[in-house]
Amino acid sequence: MGEDVGVARPSSASLAAVFKACDEDNKGYLSREDFKVAVVMLFGYKPSKIEADSIMSSVNPNTSGILLEEFLSIVRKKKEVQLHRNEIRHIFTAFDRHYRGYLTSEDFKKAFRQVAPKLSERTVLDVFREVDQDSDGLVSFKDFEYAMNYGQNEA
């Protein structure tokens, strides 16, 4: 899977075109349903009720929906999160040489020997145990993603 830079950073013009296409009645804003269609067009999934509620509650209460500037801001943030998650997935996949969907301590040791050969095996195993949230001896993508996102704050 190659880097999809075009999807990662769409231009304001292309996002504005999606906004316009989803604003069927040319109201100047997107309703909740319009926004859901825009998310399907841009991200390939229908947002949950919780996500839609969260977005709709964050917009200016004096408007009937999401204005273009708000839409651009929301979509850019979603794209950044998606790009970051894809990067984490890419790193996890590089560590998961056997494509099992989880990492063993051996996978961890091999990966660390390549990226940080001076780290002691004990340190690598300490990191593995820290990342293995449920202590099952395996690091799932969820464990790995959590460590990548929140582990930096503890260092």
Image (tube, grey):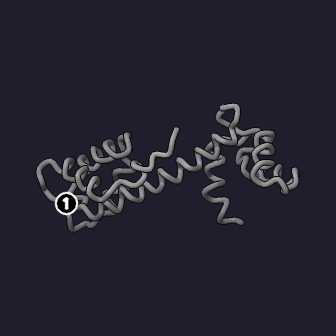
Rendered residue at 38%/58% (across/down): 76
Rendered residue at 58%/44% (across/down): 89
Any part of residue 137 in sight: no
Quarter holding residue 137: top right
Q: Is 4 or 98 nearer to us in this picture?
A: 4
Position of residue 54 relative to residue 69, above or below, is above
Any part of residue 33 in sight: yes
Q: Which residue is the extreme one toward the left?
A: 25
Rendered residue at 45%/46% (across/down): 4
Question: Circle 1 is placed at which residue position?
Answer: 64
Q: Is 125 or 14 nearer to us in this picture?
A: 14
Quarter holding residue 59: bottom left
Horizontal relation, residue 116 to residue 40: left or right: right
* Tag 1: amino acid: Ser
Q: Position of residue 103 (x, y in %)?
A: 72, 39
Rendered residue at 37%/40% (across/down): 44
Count the labels in the image.
Answer: 1
Quarter holding residue 97: top right
